[in-house]
Image (cartoon, rainbow, N blue to C red):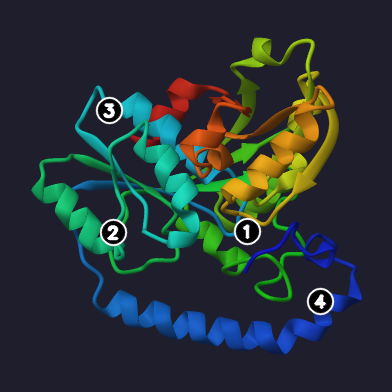
Amino acid sequence: MKFLSTPKFWNDKSHPLKYCFFLFSLIYYILFQINKMKQIIFEKEIKIKTICVGNIYLGGTGKTPLTEKIYHNLKDLKKTCIIKKFRQSQIDEINMLNSKTTIFTPKNRLAGLIEAEQKGFEIAILDDGMQDFSFKKNRSILCIKSKKGFGNENILPAGPLREPLSAIQNYEVAVINGKKNFVLENLLKSFKKDIKIFYSSYVLKNKEKFYNKKFFAFSGIADNKSFIDFLKKNDVNIVENKFFPDHYIFSDNQIEKFILKYKKKGVELITTEKNYNSISSRCKKDIFFTEIDLQIDNFKDFLNEIN
């Protein structure tokens, strides 16, 4: 399911359009539960420790940056890897993680965990996978955007949720990206009283590269507007921007047209690190990308909770 941005009614509890999709949501829920029960019957318990970074809201909650952050802070303590189910549509994220981490990209997560275990890895961090019930997880982390929360709180396609809100009880830890949100905290605790809540934010690491320049920003991520907001917050001069669907693969021809159009205007090109990794090598030299660091409040406490 690909959108330039999520449907507006997904984030509006009062929007009447959601009622048009209730029957489809019921069908989705029934099929989801049938599949869940089939997997639980054959659920495997494996020796390797699993930390699952997941979400309930479909896409754009910051799973991959958090997965990478955890990896870099555990890899020197124990032999650690990342498991990300292979999807051709997510090759951009796979390439990005592959350049910086030890990653397994199986078509089946359980098979990937077994392979990692056989190769001597002690910890596997799963980038997504909370809706995979074929194996037991040691720790589960729920990623949420403070601004969006759980949208209109309906499951697909009437809303943005992959599971009902009751699935919150399956997580030990929640990481809210953005500003303090006490309403969201109370909602989480209403489903799981002892859930541990932490806040995160993004910091632009290579900000100095963008001084005194004008940029055309383009991106193909789940929340394109958040990319533009982040650039503006960091005083990057954006004169024009263009959005594409999440995991969009840019062709050389497309990038070359952008370069030709904007370079003669004295405007540079900028994109996300994820999108940059999907661009061919010969075009990369003419493109800037954002290097971000995910910062988590009370980070030592967070590591203690998941480790």
Disc 2 and disc 3: Cα gap in Å?
20 Å
Give the residue number, with chain letter if any, for mark 3. Answer: 75
Q: Amino acid at mark 1?
A: Tyr
Secondary structure found at label 2: loop
**Cβ–Cβ under 8 Å for marks 1 and 3:** no
Q: Quadrant of the N terminus?
A: bottom right
**Cβ–Cβ under 8 Å for marks 4 and 3:** no
Residue 14 point in image, percent of width and height? 90, 68
N-terminal label among 2 and 3: 3
Q: Nearer the viewer, residue 172 or 44?
A: 44
Image disc number at residue 106 = 2
Q: Is residue 55 above or below residue 163?
A: above
Q: Nearer the viewer, residue 11 or 299?
A: 11
Q: Amino acid at mark 3?
A: Lys
Secondary structure found at label 1: loop
Give the residue number, with chain letter if any, for mark 1. Answer: 57
Disc 1 and disc 3: Cα gap in Å?
28 Å
Disc 4 and disc 3: Cα gap in Å?
44 Å
